[in-house]
Structures are given as structure tokens and as C-alpha cells.
Image (spheres, grey):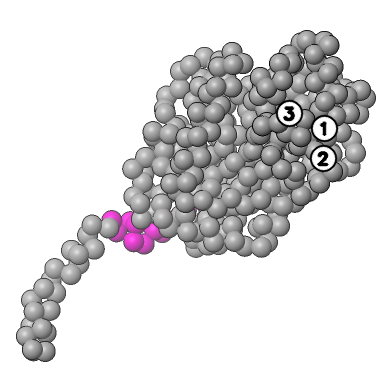
């Protein structure tokens, strides 16, 4: 019997290489060269900062360079289009954030459908936005702000880093849930908005927590509330907006996508590499210092999050009546 089995094995030996043919060779040895990680916003901002932290650890995990490339334009659509039009081989991945969900409704003419044309890879981080005020602004709480806004509809300006950004939509959601009317002032990035907040040109603004946490901790601006359902560990004394406006919640989520058609084997390798990176206590500490926490997710779960957020923000965009050609 042993001899017969051996002869049978010899007979089929030439076919053994074909048994793994169903798994592309590029997936079996991926990655063999640098991976390009495209960020759709300017250097120095929260997205770029977090992508560079991730890229450093992910490069060590994958054994190949992870090159961060900032490709700015059209509220993040330029960079994401570059990602989605790249070969689906795992060597071009994209940094995903709430703008990808918001833009689906905000932009009247967008050359792609993000949910349809992307492959979800992994979740990476979640954090809060923060509503903050110039120290001279009389309102010291969210309730104070709402009362003043109701007394003076449209007379209180709030800044953000741009139309359709998560901070902008945080303000629009507050208006929708409270019936107040604020006037949005869109800046070309967080830095100039924060500069005007500090200078008193605008009284309040919404920002991603990493962009303002140092100013808050140093006492240069006053934090009125965070947008998440629970208070954040780094600012335990700052209440949530939901403590005043029940049901209010905005959390900023970050993740990674690849072009549609990327082989599942490559997606799985990337997902496992990201999860391993997120389990690193040193990376967790760096995220914590930025006011965030790790958010490991399977590709399917991350895809569901993006789809759910796309539906949520579509309602807010339509309520606000904002659109970009």
C-alpha cells in the first residue's frame, strides 16, 4: 500500500505547483517593494500626522517601506481618486476618514462612488472633535452657547478647517438638533482657523481633538464640549455635547482602503499587519497622547462603518443645504 501511495504521489507531483495557482503569486509573497500610502490632505494636519505614525510601524511589520504621499485637492477627492484608479495589487492604499462618507452627498459631481469603488482594509483610530471658544467669548458651556445663538440667530460665527469636513458637519449637526442658527466660516485648513480663534476673529470653532489639544491643555482656548458619546480620557473635565443635547454624537474614524478588486489574500495580510501594529503599546500611547484610541476592525466591519456613516452624513448635508460643484 505504501509503494502504491508513493507511486501515486510521483504521478501527481508535476501538478503540485498548479494547486496554488488559484492564489496569485503576488499575494503569496506580498509585499516585495514599497507600499504607497496616500493621504488626501495637507502635511501637518491630523490625517497626515496619524498616517505617518501608522506608516512607521506598518513598515516595520511588513518589512517594506510605507511611503506617505499627500495629494491635496477637492476636499480629499483628488487623493482618493488616485487611490481608486491605481492597480489593485496592494501597493497603493488610501487613508480613509469621515470626509469620504460626507463627500458622497456634499459633492454634486464626484468621479467615483467610494463605497462601490473601494475595498475596505482595516480600521485604525477613532477620536473626538471638540467645540472650543476664544477666552473672551462669554459662553462658558454648550448650554450658554445654545441660549446665545437662539437669542441672536446667525450672529455667532463658527470656524472649521473647510466645507464638508467633520468639524464643519459637527456644527451643522448641532444646529439640526437644537434649532439654533450659526454662521459657518470655512478656512483652508485647521491651522488658520485656530489662529483666528486665538486672535478673536471668530468666537468658536470645531476641530479634530489632535489639532487643538495643546491649546486646550495650555489654557489658550476654552473647550466647551467634545463630540463623542463619552468623555475622553485626555480631557476628563470637558463634558460631552450630548450631556446638554441628548443623542448628539460625532466621532472621527480613520482607516485604510485599497482599490476595488484587490485580492482578498492581500487585504487579509494588510489587515493582520494593521491589527498587529495597533496592538503595540507604544503606538497606543502615541494615539492616546493625541486624544484618540486604536480601532482595530475586520475589513467587513470597517466597510459597514463607512456605509453607515455615509448614510448618516447624507441626512445632515441635505439638512444644511450645503453643496460643492
- CA distance for labels 3 and 2: 15 Å
Q: Residues within 10 Å of mark 2 (few under 14, many from 20)?
A: some
- Viewer-proximal residue, 31 or 139? 139
- CA distance for labels 3 and 1: 13 Å
Is residue 31 in the magenta section? Answer: yes
Query: Residue at (71%, 16%) from the top-left corner?
Result: 179
Q: Earlier in the sequence, mark 1 or mark 2?
A: 1
Write down the quadrant of residue 276 in the picture.
bottom right
Which residue is under mark 3? 245
| Front label number (3 vs 1) | 3
Q: Position of residue 228 (x, y in %)?
A: 69, 38
Left or right? Give the position of 129 relative to 194.
left
Q: Earlier in the sequence, mark 3 or mark 2?
A: 2
Query: Residue at (75%, 43%) from the top-left corner?
Result: 231
State which region is magenta: 24-36
Decide if residue 291 is in sight here. Answer: yes
Secondary structure state at the residue bearing disc 1: strand
Q: Earlier in the sequence, mark 3 or mark 1?
A: 1
Query: Residue at (18%, 63%) from the top-left corner?
Result: 18
Q: Residue furthest front?
A: 246
Q: Residues within 10 Å of mark 3 (few under 14, many from 20)?
A: some
Please report contact status of discs 3 and 2: CB closer than 8 Å, yes or no: no
Q: Position of residue 88 (x, y in %)?
A: 36, 44
Please report contact status of discs 1 and 2: CB closer than 8 Å, yes or no: yes
Name above or below for residue 107 compared with residue 58.
Answer: above
Which residue is under mark 2? 238
Secondary structure state at the residue bearing disc 3: loop
Which residue is under mark 1? 224
Is residue 299 in the magenta section? Answer: no
Secondary structure state at the residue bearing disc 2: loop
Amino acid at each position: 500500500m505504501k509503494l502504491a501511495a508513493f507511486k501515486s504521489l510521483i504521478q501527481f507531483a508535476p501538478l503540485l505547483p498548479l494547486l496554488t495557482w488559484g492564489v496569485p503569486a503576488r499575494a503569496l509573497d506580498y509585499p516585495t517593494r514599497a507600499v504607497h500610502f496616500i493621504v488626501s490632505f495637507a502635511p501637518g494636519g491630523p490625517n497626515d500626522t496619524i498616517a505617518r505614525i501608522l506608516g512607521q510601524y506598518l513598515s516595520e511589520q511588513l518589512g517594506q517601506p510605507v511611503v506617505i504621499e499627500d495629494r491635496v485637492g477637492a476636499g480629499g477627492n483628488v487623493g482618493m481618486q488616485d487611490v481608486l484608479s491605481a492597480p489593485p495589487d496592494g501597493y497603493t492604499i488610501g487613508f480613509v476618514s469621515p470626509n469620504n462618507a460626507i463627500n458622497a452627498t456634499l459633492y454634486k459631481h464626484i468621479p467615483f462612488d467610494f463605497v462601490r469603488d473601494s475595498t475596505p482594509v482595516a480600521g485604525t483610530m477613532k477620536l473626538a472633535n471638540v467645540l472650543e471658544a476664544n477666552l473672551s467669548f462669554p459662553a462658558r458651556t454648550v448650554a450658554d452657547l445654545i441660549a446665545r445663538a437662539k437669542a441672536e440667530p446667525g450672529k455667532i460665527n463658527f470656524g472649521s478647517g473647510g466645507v464638508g469636513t467633520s468639524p464643519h458637519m459637527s456644527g451643522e449637526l448641532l444646529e439640526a438638533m437644537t434649532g439654533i442658527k450659526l454662521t459657518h466660516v470655512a478656512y483652508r485648513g485647521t491651522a488658520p482657523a485656530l489662529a483666528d480663534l486665538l486672535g478673536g476673529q471668530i468666537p468658536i470653532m470645531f476641530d479634530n481633538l489632535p489639532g487643538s489639544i495643546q491649546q486646550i491643555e495650555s489654557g489658550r482656548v476654552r473647550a466647551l464640549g467634545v463630540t463623542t458619546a463619552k468623555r475622553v480620557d485626555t480631557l476628563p473635565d470637558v463634558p460631552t455635547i450630548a450631556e446638554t443635547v441628548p443623542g448628539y454624537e460625532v466621532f472621527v474614524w480613520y482607516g485604510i482602503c485599497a482599490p476595488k478588486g484587490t485580492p482578498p489574500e492581500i487585504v487579509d495580510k494588510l489587515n493582520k499587519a494593521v491589527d498587529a501594529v495597533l496592538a503595540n503599546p507604544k503606538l497606543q500611547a502615541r494615539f492616546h497622547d493625541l486624544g484618540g484610541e486604536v480601532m482595530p476592525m475586520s475589513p467587513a466591519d470597517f466597510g459597514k462603518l463607512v456605509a453607515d456613516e455615509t448614510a448618516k452624513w447624507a441626512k445632515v448635508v441635505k439638512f444644511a443645504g450645503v453643496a460643492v460643484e
